[in-house]
Amino acid sequence: MIIHSGYNDLNLNSTVVTLGIFDGVHKGHMVLLNHLVTSAASKKCESAVITFSPHPREVLEPSNSGLAFLSTTEEKIALLEKAGIDHLIIIQFTKEFSAIPACDFIKDILHGKIGTRHLVIGFNHHFGKGGEGDLNTIKKCSEELGFVVEQVGGFKTPEGTVSSSVIRNALLKGDLDAANRWLGYDYSVSGKVIEGRKLGRTIGFPTANIRPSSPNKLIPRNGVYAVEVKQNNTLYPGMLNIGSNPTVNTDSNFRSIEVNILNFDRDIYGQDITVFFRKRLRDEKKFESLEELTAQMELDRQNTLEMFKK
């Protein structure tokens, strides 16, 4: 996959193209991407995906402190590469770019700069100024340009059509099983190991405190999770707590991400790790004593080990 920053210096003249945010690159996106790759091969064209950085909501809603996304740009690139596309075009999203009318975008960029011969869009896709570029508008604007516009349906489940917002809501509600099933892979968070309060080691469960690499990376609902930890390309089982540690902390606004890496005793302060969320074990709760907390953590450890044995 060739990665392009912007569209001004491209040398493409016969492409099958799709475009979107692709937050999480989930199963719904894969329906679209697989169709894109197959169509490009059948037409002897190159496949191209257009996406945007930063996320448009970061530009259009700068005062919204609650923005949270399934994937960083780096994670999105890695996921899209697995889809087998030929070109990834990352356009810098600005307020000026957002003001481009849909027909101008189609004529000047999709057709003029990227050489689109066949445009594939999702079932609920809109783009251009004010989201005016729906299927009918796209078809009308592209008629004189001579390229085909095709709409592809989403990935449907008994619960409905899979979307990034549905998956984000599942993670925020603690429904990890559903989120991972709809993603098609286990959700992950990457970050740097930072100094914590070191209370875990006093009860026999030392933890690595994680500062996520992106402030807008979605953190799942508070609770205890069985995870795998990737450190220096090696995977280790672990149990991770997200929350305020109410047994030993009275500040309800405090929130930490701490992982106890099982059978691991190396100093990794300052290093980057990735945690893969395999299973949600339980809600976070306040215990009456450290002894009760320790007993529960031992049970969590056993449950984590049993899960990995299966």
Image: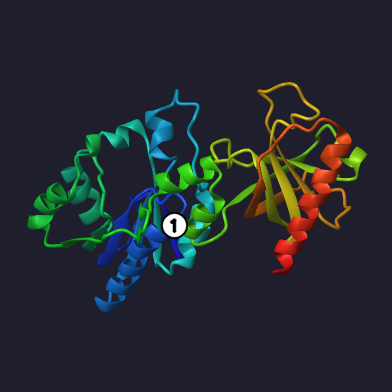
Amino acid type indicated by mark 1: His
User: On screen, 84 above or below 290?
Assistant: below
User: On screen, 187 above or below 13?
Assistant: above
Q: Nearer the viewer, residue 14 or 188?
A: 188
Where is residue 25 shown, x and y percent of the image? Answer: 44, 56
Tell me the SS state at disc 1. loop
Q: Is residue 301 visible?
A: yes
- Which residue is painted at 56% across and 51% down in the image? 176
Where is residue 226 shown, x and y percent of the image? Answer: 69, 53
**Where does the C terminus fall, quadrant-wise?**
bottom right
- The image quarter in which residue 159 lies: bottom left
Count of marks placed on residues: 1
User: On screen, 91 above or below 235?
Assistant: above
Where is residue 207 shown, x and y percent of the image? Answer: 81, 43
Where is residue 127 shown, x and y percent of the image? Answer: 26, 44
Disc 1: which residue: 26
- Which residue is painted at 69% across and 54% down in the image? 227
- Which residue is painted at 45% across and 23% down in the image? 63
